[in-house]
C-alpha cells in the first residue's frame, strides 16, 4: 500500500483512492495508466527509462513516444492540482520519468514487480479475473477523474444539462482499416467511399464514438490482433473486413463484428459478404444504395437491437456519373494535398452541374472551400463560397444528415474574420457532453485569451474522447496547451507524425524546448511531403531558422505575407504564426508590425504574447507593450460582456 498526499494506491486490489471529506473516493483508471503509476512509485528512487516502460507495460511491443507521453499526461491530469504546484512526475529529458512526490509505504506490503495484463493475441477468452478488472477499468477510464473532481456543470455555464456524475463515456466502435488492393482504381475508390459511408452512418445512428480506420493505420502489425485494438481504443465493438473482387466492376465486402461482452470476451459475429457494383447505370446505383443500407442495418442490429436506421433523406443522386465524380473527388480530399483539393473542386462542380440537387456534392464543396483557406492559404473568398454551399445543403437536406462539420466550419469562419464575440455568443452554451460543441467554444476562448477556461473545456473534451485531436481526419489541434507552454502534454495529444498541420506545431514545440534534432527531422518530413503548401512553407522557414539562415526564413515569410495580403486573408491566429517566425529570425520590426495586425484581426490572447518563448526577442520593446495593452483592452471588454473572469494578470509557467 502506497500513500502520497491525499492519494492511496493498493497494488493488490488494483485501487487508487483519494481522501475525501468523509470517505475515500475511488479513482478508476485504465490498466496501462495504473501499471505505469505503480512502476514509477516502486522505482521512485531513480529515473524509469522509456525502455523499461516499453518492456514492463507494453512487453516490448512497438509503440511511439507519443503513446508513452499520453500515459504520463493522463497521470498528471489525475494527480496534479491546477494551482501550478510541482508535478508528481518529473520528466528527465532524453532518459525517462521519475515519481518525485513523498511516498509512505505500509510495511506489511512488500515491493512487487508490476504485472500488467498480458496482451491477448487472439479472440480467445483471457483469464477471467484479469479481464473483469480490465473491462471495469476500460468502461470507467475516461470519466473517472471528472466524476471525482469536476463540477456537475461546465465552468461559467448556466445550461441545464445533466450532472457529469450521471454521464457515461460513449461506447466505442472501432472500424479497422481494410486493405484495398483490387488492381482496379475505380473499385478502390468505391471501396474507400463505402468504408467512409459505413463509419459515418454508424456514428449518426448509434450515438457512439466511432473510430475511423484512418486513425488506426499507425498500429501496423497489431491491426491483425483484435485484442490489441480493443485495448488501444477501449472498444466495445470492432468491425473487421476484407475485400474480394468478384467481377471486373464488382467487389464483395466481407465483414466480421466483434462484441466485447460482460465476461470480457470478444465474441465474433460473421456478417457475411456484401456485394457492391461500381455503378455504371441507374439500376446499379440503386442496388449500391440498397446494399449500403442493408450493410449498416446488419451491423446496427447487433450493436443496438431495435434501432431504426435513419435515412439520409434527399442527399444522394440518381445520376451514376455524378455519383462517380463525387466519390473520386472525396478520395482526392482525403490526402489534404492542395493540388488534389483543387482538382477535386472541378469534379464536384461537374457533379452539381449534372444534378443541381445533389446535397452530398454541395457538402463536399463546402469541405473543399473551407480547406482551401485553412490548409492551402487561398483567398478569403473561399470562406464565402463555403458558407454559400452550407446554405444549399441546409435547403436541400435539412437535418437529414450528419453535417456537424458545417457548423464547425461556420464557427471557424466567424472567428477568423474578426467576429470572435459573435462566435462565442453562438457557442457559449455548448452541450457539456458534445465534444464538437465544446471545442467550438474552446476555439473562441483561446482566441480571446481565456486560456484557463479554455483548458477546462479541453479537459472535458478529453474526458469524453481521449483521442479527439489525434484521430483522422485531423481538423483540430489542442493549441490551448501550446499557448500555456505545456509542451509535453501538447506533444502527447498530437496525431502520429505524417500530418503537415500537426507536424508543423510539433516541430515548433520541439524547437522551443531545445530538441533541435527532433524538430529538424519532423520539419524535413513536412517539406518532403508538401513543399509548396502553407504548412510546408512555414516548416521550411522554421527549418532555415534552425539552420541559422535567417535571411532565407525571412524571404519565405515575406512571400507568405504578400500572398495573404493579395488574398485579403484575415485569420489573426495564422498571422501570429508569421509573427513567431519573424521574431525567431530576429526581424523585430516585421514581427511587431504583424503583431499589431494580429490584434487588429481579432486574435488577442495577451497572456500568450507575454509568455511565448518564440517572442523573447521583442518582449522588452516598448511597441510590444503597447500592442499587448490593446489586446488586454479587448480581452477585458470580452470578459465584461460575457461575465468571465479576466485572465489579463495570469502568469503562465513554462512547463519543463
Image (cartoon, helix red, strand yellow):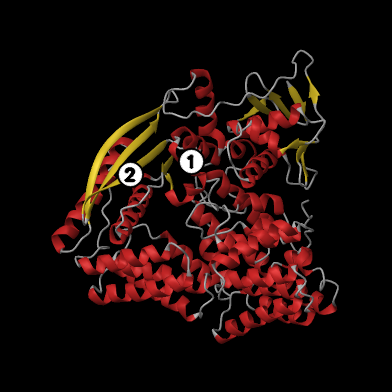
| Res 243 seen here | yes
Horizontal and vertical percent position of residue 415: 56, 70
- Residue 564 image-quadrant placement: bottom right
Which residue is labeled 2 in the image? 242
Q: Foreground residue, 273 or 569?
A: 273
**Residue shown at 78%/66% (left/top)?**
610
Closer to us: 406 or 477: 477
The quarter of the displayed image where residue 401 is located:
bottom left
Which element type, helix, strand or loop, lies under badge 2?
strand
Of the numbered discs 1 and 2, the one sitting upstream in the chain is: 1
> On the picture, is 604 further left or further right than 525?
right
**Which residue lies at the image location 63% right of the left edge and 71% below the top edge?**
538
Tell me if residue 112 comes above or below residue 537 in the rendering. Answer: above
Compared across the picture, whether 376 is left or right of 325 comes to right
- Give the answer, above or below, for where 318 lies relative to 568: above
Reading the image, the residue beneath label 1 is 221
- Label 2 neighbourhood size at 10 Å, few (<14), some (14-19), many (20+)? some
Work out which residue is located at the far front of the displayed protein and give it.
Answer: 183
Give the x, y percent position of residue 360: 31, 65
Q: What residue is rendered at 57% in x and 63% in y?
A: 501
Quadrant (top left, top right, bottom left, bottom right) of the N terminus:
top right
Amino acid at each position: 500500500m502506497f500513500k502520497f498526499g491525499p492519494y492511496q494506491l493498493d497494488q493488490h486490489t488494483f485501487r487508487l483512492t483519494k481522501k475525501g471529506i468523509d470517505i475515500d473516493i475511488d479513482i478508476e483508471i485504465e490498466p496501462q495508466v495504473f501499471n505505469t503509476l505503480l512502476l514509477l512509485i516502486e522505482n521512485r528512487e531513480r529515473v524509469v527509462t522509456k525502455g523499461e516502460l516499453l518492456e514492463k507495460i507494453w512487453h516490448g511491443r512497438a509503440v511511439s513516444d507519443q503513446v508513452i507521453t499520453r500515459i504520463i499526461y493522463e497521470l498528471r491530469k489525475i494527480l496534479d492540482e491546477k494551482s501550478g504546484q510541482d508535478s508528481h512526475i518529473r520528466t528527465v529529458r532524453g532518459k525517462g520519468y521519475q515519481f518525485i512526490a513523498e511516498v509512505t509505504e505500509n510495511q506489511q506490503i512488500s515491493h512487487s514487480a508490476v504485472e500488467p495484463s498480458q496482451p491477448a493475441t487472439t479472440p480467445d477468452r483471457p483469464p477471467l479475473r484479469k479481464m473483469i478488472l480490465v473491462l471495469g477499468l476500460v468502461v470507467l477510464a475516461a470519466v473517472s477523474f471528472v466524476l471525482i473532481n469536476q463540477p456537475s456543470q461546465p465552468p461559467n455555464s448556466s445550461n441545464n444539462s445533466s450532472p457529469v456524475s450521471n454521464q457515461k463515456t460513449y461506447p466505442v466502435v472501432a472500424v479497422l482499416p481494410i486493405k484495398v488492393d483490387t488492381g482496379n482504381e475505380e473499385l478502390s475508390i468505391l471501396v474507400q467511399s463505402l468504408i467512409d459511408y459505413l463509419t459515418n452512418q454508424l456514428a449518426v445512428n448509434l450515438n457512439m464514438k466511432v473510430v475511423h480506420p484512418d486513425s488506426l493505420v499507425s498500429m501496423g502489425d497489431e491491426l491483425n490482433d483484435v485484442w490489441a485494438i480493443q485495448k488501444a481504443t477501449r472498444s466495445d465493438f470492432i468491425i473487421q473486413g476484407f475485400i474480394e473482387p468478384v467481377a471486373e466492376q464488382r467487389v464483395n465486402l466481407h465483414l466480421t463484428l466483434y462484441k466485447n461482452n460482460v465476461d470480457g470476451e470478444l465474441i465474433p459475429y460473421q456478417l457475411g459478404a456484401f456485394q457492391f457494383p461500381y455503378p455504371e447505370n441507374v439500376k446499379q446505383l440503386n442496388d449500391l444504395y440498397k446494399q449500403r443500407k442493408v450493410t449498416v442495418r446488419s451491423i446496427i442490429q447487433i450493436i443496438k437491437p431495435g434501432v431504426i436506421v435513419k435515412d439520409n433523406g434527399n442527399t444522394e443522386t440518381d445520376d451514376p456519373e455524378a455519383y462517380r465524380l463525387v466519390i473520386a473527388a472525396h478520395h482526392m480530399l482525403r490526402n489534404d494535398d492542395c493540388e488534389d483539393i483543387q482538382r477535386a473542386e472541378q469534379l464536384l462542380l461537374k457533379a452539381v452541374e449534372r444534378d443541381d440537387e445533389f446535397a452530398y456534392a454541395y457538402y463536399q464543396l463546402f469541405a473543399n472551400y473551407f480547406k482551401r483557406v485553412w490548409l492551402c492559404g487561398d483567398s478569403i473568398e473561399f470562406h464565402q463560397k463555403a458558407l454559400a454551399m452550407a446554405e444549399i445543403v441546409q435547403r436541400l437536406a435539412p437535418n437529414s444528415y450528419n453535417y456537424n462539420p458545417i457548423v464547425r466550419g461556420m464557427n471557424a469562419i466567424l472567428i477568423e474574420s474578426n467576429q470572435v464575440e459573435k462566435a462565442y455568443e453562438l457557442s457559449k452554451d455548448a452541450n457539456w457532453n458534445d465534444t464538437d460543441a465544446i471545442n467550438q467554444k474552446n476555439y473562441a476562448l483561446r482566441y480571446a485569451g481565456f486560456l484557463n477556461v479554455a483548458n477546462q473545456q479541453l479537459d472535458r473534451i478529453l474526458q469524453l474522447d481521449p483521442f479527439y485531436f489525434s484521430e483522422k481526419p485531423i481538423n483540430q489541434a489542442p493549441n490551448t496547451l501550446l499557448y500555456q507552454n505545456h509542451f509535453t502534454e501538447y506533444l502527447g495529444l498530437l496525431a502520429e507524425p505524417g500530418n503537415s498541420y500537426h507536424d508543423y506545431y510539433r516541430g515548433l514545440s520541439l524547437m522551443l524546448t531545445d530538441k533541435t534534432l527532433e524538430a529538424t527531422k519532423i520539419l524535413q518530413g513536412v517539406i518532403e511531403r508538401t513543399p509548396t503548401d502553407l504548412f510546408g512553407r512555414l516548416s521550411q522557414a522554421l527549418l532555415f531558422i534552425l539552420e541559422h539562415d535567417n535571411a532565407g526564413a525571412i524571404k519565405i515569410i515575406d512571400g507568405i505575407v504578400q500572398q495573404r495580403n493579395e488574398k485579403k486573408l484575415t485569420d489573426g491566429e495564422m498571422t501570429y504564426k508569421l509573427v513567431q517566425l519573424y521574431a525567431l529570425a530576429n526581424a523585430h520590426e516585421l514581427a511587431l508590425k504583424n503583431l499589431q495586425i494580429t490584434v487588429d484581426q481579432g486574435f488577442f490572447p495577451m497572456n500568450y504574447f507575454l509568455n511565448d518563448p518564440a517572442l523573447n526577442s521583442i518582449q522588452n520593446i516598448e511597441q510590444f507593450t503597447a500592442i499587448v495593452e490593446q489586446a488586454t483592452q479587448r480581452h477585458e471588454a470580452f470578459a465584461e460582456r460575457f461575465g468571465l473572469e479576466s485572465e489579463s494578470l495570469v502568469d503562465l509557467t513554462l512547463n519543463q
